[in-house]
Amino acid sequence: MKKYILFGFMFIAISLSAQEAFYTKTLKELIAFETLIKENRISDLSKLIDESLYTGQENNSFYKSNINDKTVPDDMFVWFIITDDKSLAAVIGNNESVFEMTKAERNHIWVDFFSVIETGFPYAIHKYSAEYFEDEKGDSLQFEKISRYEFRYKVDGKYDWITNKASNFFNGSSNEKHIVYSFFGPGQLSHIDILVPRDDDKGWEDEVSPFFYVVGRDLQESQPIPSPIDIPFFMSLKNFNDRIWSDN
């Protein structure tokens, strides 16, 4: 009996790991697609969409499921459309709900999907904070640098340690309408905002739009123009923070 229980736990762990890998891969694809759109690299965009096993549909929309990509869980699909303003409207769904979802169904999927994002502080803010705490440490402020991208501090010895991490994802721009994950990554754009509707005026059983949005933000005139995104290198990274892109 214990063997069956152990096998069950192992199967669940493998399934969750495969699902997490699928979510990470999907989010990386959407970020790469949007970056190529903003860089106006249309032939590279078409190539990557094909290599990522999406099927083209009407009105600049693309779809994939387990039928054409075995890394997609059996009951899931990905669909996105390139909008007129050159952003992406995307759906991560299951084959039962398709595009009609209650808020509870949609948010259940989103909780898992966006769990692959680890937010923190942009590197410039993290670096400034580390230098400040290093200078100010003393009897009333304890400071420990854990790595280049992580430190912790404690004030007056009265509080728990507070950890500060650098991350390519920052959610300091969230507002009443959207949870906003800002991705500071590679490519010739300022950053990418992932807008996740809150729909606070809807009940859990109300039908809601299943879309979230991937929006590339243009460089400001004062910003230097970085190198174009290196697609093979970006797609080869396992996790989103394997390289902190703003640490030049």
Image: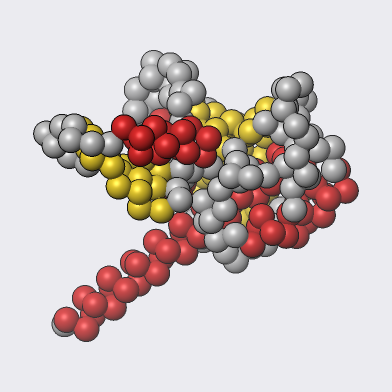
Report the front residue among 144 and 181.
144
Q: Residue at x 49, y 23 (%)?
A: 173
Q: Can residue 35 be seen from the camera position used here?
A: yes
| Vertical order, 100 against 3 (above or below) | above
Locate residue 151: give its quadrant. Answer: top left
Report the front residue among 62 and 167.
167
- Residue 227: x, y in percent? 78, 44
| Vertical order, 167 against 175 (above or below) | below
Q: Residue at x 86, y 43 (%)?
A: 42
Report the front residue among 226 and 10.
226
In the visual, does 207 lie left or right of 9?
right
Q: Residue at x 65, y 50 (%)?
A: 29
In the visual, does 78 lie left or right of 93?
right
| Vertical order, 70 against 209 (above or below) | below
Q: Residue at x 35, y 39 (%)?
A: 134
- Residue 163: x, y in percent? 31, 42
- Residue 120: x, y in percent? 43, 39
Colouring mode (rainbow / by chain / secondary structure / one colour) = secondary structure
- Residue 72: x, y in percent? 56, 59
